[in-house]
Image (cartoon, coloured by chain):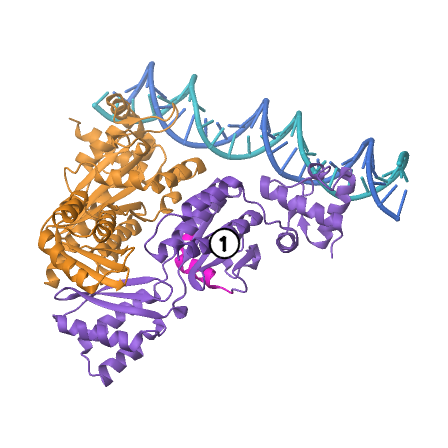
Chain colours: A purple, B orange, C cyan, D blue
Amino acid sequence: MLEERKKRVLQAIVELYIKTAEPVSSNAIMNLEGLEYSSATIRNEMAELEKMGYIEKPHTSAGRVPSAKGYRFYVDELLQEDKITLEEIKYISEKLETKVNEMEEITKLTSSTISEITHYTTVSIGPSSDVQTIENIRFVLLSTRMMMAVILTDNGLVKETIIKFDEDITENQVQTLNYMFNNKLKGEPITKIDKPLEKYLVEEMQYSVNLIKPIIEQMKKVIEEESVHLEGASRLLELPEFSSLEVAKNFLNILDEKDLMADMLNTGFAKDINVYIGEENEQEALKDYSIVTFKHRIGNKDLGTIGIIGPKRMDYAKVISVMKYISKKLNDNDKEEN
Amino acid sequence: MLEERKKRVLQAIVELYIKTAEPVSSNAIMNLEGLEYSSATIRNEMAELEKMGYIEKPHTSAGRVPSAKGYRFYVDELLQEDKITLEEIKYISEKLETKVNEMEEITKLTSSTISEITHYTTVSIGPSSDVQTIENIRFVLLSTRMMMAVILTDNGLVKETIIKFDEDITENQVQTLNYMFNNKLKGEPITKIDKPLEKYLVEEMQYSVNLIKPIIEQMKKVIEEESVHLEGASRLLELPEFSSLEVAKNFLNILDEKDLMADMLNTGFAKDINVYIGEENEQEALKDYSIVTFKHRIGNKDLGTIGIIGPKRMDYAKVISVMKYISKKLNDNDKEEN
DNA sequence: TTTAGCACTCTTTTTTATTGTTTGCTAATT
DNA sequence: AATTAGCAAACAATAAAAAAGAGTGCTAAA
């Protein structure tokens, strides 16, 4: 465990570095609250913190920079969660009051709000399909060979898709489909819509392959579709660590990899808010960045996961404060409405 | 009119500059096809071309760079449209054979194909709402207070939206709506769905405001929604003109302005393919870029507009070749299917 | 009409010098 | 024993100077 003064020094280094992106010198932190010592004393503490692995030097004559271990300690032990201003609270409240018709839009709204307030890039994704159950399925004939399928899930999500057929479909067939699918699938997980179901319907129930096959295939597609939503992609470019084109390009390329982003949002969820600092990220490409993931929900309805991507010197305190506030706000709003 | 040799020189300068992004010296173009003269002779021609305004010098001791006038002359008179390789043809054909269920996906597919082949950024938008007419409208009750509306247009586009109500809706009401909307609106332009219609339905036809108002409002919203689709945003960053972070940021910010992009895609359409070079763009922010717009259609169905954004030294020949090829291919594919 | 030749211009790259920041250590002080 | 003043050493960052390179425009000859 770290002595109190060392903690203060580490905290000062982390917070100043988050603020300025410049290595922090012994001079810069002397005389701060609780650190009324000469720079030489601070230097001694810094030397020890370095030996312990909490901070490091870019080169001999530079100030110190937090190491991954340093950030981790800061996040776990030193971080204070009140870094949210009144204006920000006001802004968030206003944005979250926007009326939305679809649950998915709440996720987008939340993720854009977080991006705007924190100035980091956010990525979001809906709830994973295996936690969702079917509440209702509707088929609607759009034209003789084109049908629309709408699936309502228990968390209020709507998934629709258009299905084309090679032969004409009758209104009668559509009604049978409506009855049968609802009867069989209501309350079941949406992942039940798959190949075995197709097989069952065709082989056991004697439905026409030409009718069932396109339906199942297309529905399966929308269900599995993980649509990643991005917000504020260019925002990070304002930060000094992205002032090299090399780095900027690398970052934009990472964002372009939807699969990678989906992966990232789907890894390990001990808590609702998780912090991954630099090398702690499982994905190789993200080892230079920090990610904070936020599984958000209203009541017990899972609404998906939002990830904030930023530099390692991300303002963790701010990000976490904002998330917690939004989470609270979302649930309050919901209660009011009922 | 330019003498033949001057044309050759101008062409060489434009093409070399497009390729290398470096000012073109007299040395570099001597001995090219049709230019078997000494560098001094070329220099004389270049001096004259400069006086006429076709090319310019970044500074005294640099080579020449095409001016906007130079590019314009090149595009109008010199450009050869066979700049498309066999591999590219193969790649395009394969991609365009992907089966899609929605017309909108064709636009996305086309725009991503163009971006991939040309390495420029593309922006696309659906057909403007005032050229579309209603083919069919469907209302489907999803739950007691939630309804889905689906509009089919004559160009095969599907627009759907979810509508929430403050009071319960009966299946009966939905059927009336279905009958009435179709009866009244089939064959009409979709822009007919607006405030006056709401007024008519409520005041003359005595429908409940609580029912009609949310419907019209929400439908109006989806109709007016111009969803701009972006492809290959980070691609331009590979080009040397974007090697300054300043410029790169500027570019990304322009792309973020959806309204600007929509504007750009909606300005003046003399032909299906239009080229705007630098200052020729109406929008101030685009004066440093060149835009090629491409109104694409299958038969006489308008499918929307795709814009390619690149530097002024864009490879116009390639871009135009690709567009023409895709246009042909789309229409051929369509014929085959019928 | 074309071209060789060369001085001149201006950018780009390389080198050298200068300034500034911060550390680590030693010795003095509290 | 803990703290601090003081100072040399280590680099980075900046500025200034020098050298190299690429092209042009013009003149005079072919």
Q: In this rendering, is residue B101 above or below B188?
A: below
Residue B325 makes an appearance in the image: yes
Whole-percent x, y for residue B96 in the image:
22, 58
Q: Nearer the viewer, residue A149 or D30?
A: A149
Q: Which residues are magenta?
A: A255-268
Residue A260: in magenta span: yes
Whole-percent x, y for residue B295 in the image:
18, 45
Residue at left offset 52%, top offset 53%: A324
Q: In this rendering, is residue B109 above or below A164?
A: above
- The reply, left or right, for residue C9 in relation to residue B103 is right
Whole-percent x, y for residue B317 in the image:
23, 42
Mark 1 highlights which residue?
A328
Q: Nearer the viewer, residue A71 or A269?
A: A269
Does dot 1 land on a helix, a strand or a loop? helix
Residue at left offset 29%, top offset 78%: A197
Q: In this rendering, is residue B41 above or below A51?
A: above
- Circle 1: is it few (<14), some (14-19), or many (20+) Cα within 10 Å? few
The kind of residue tagged 1 is: Lys
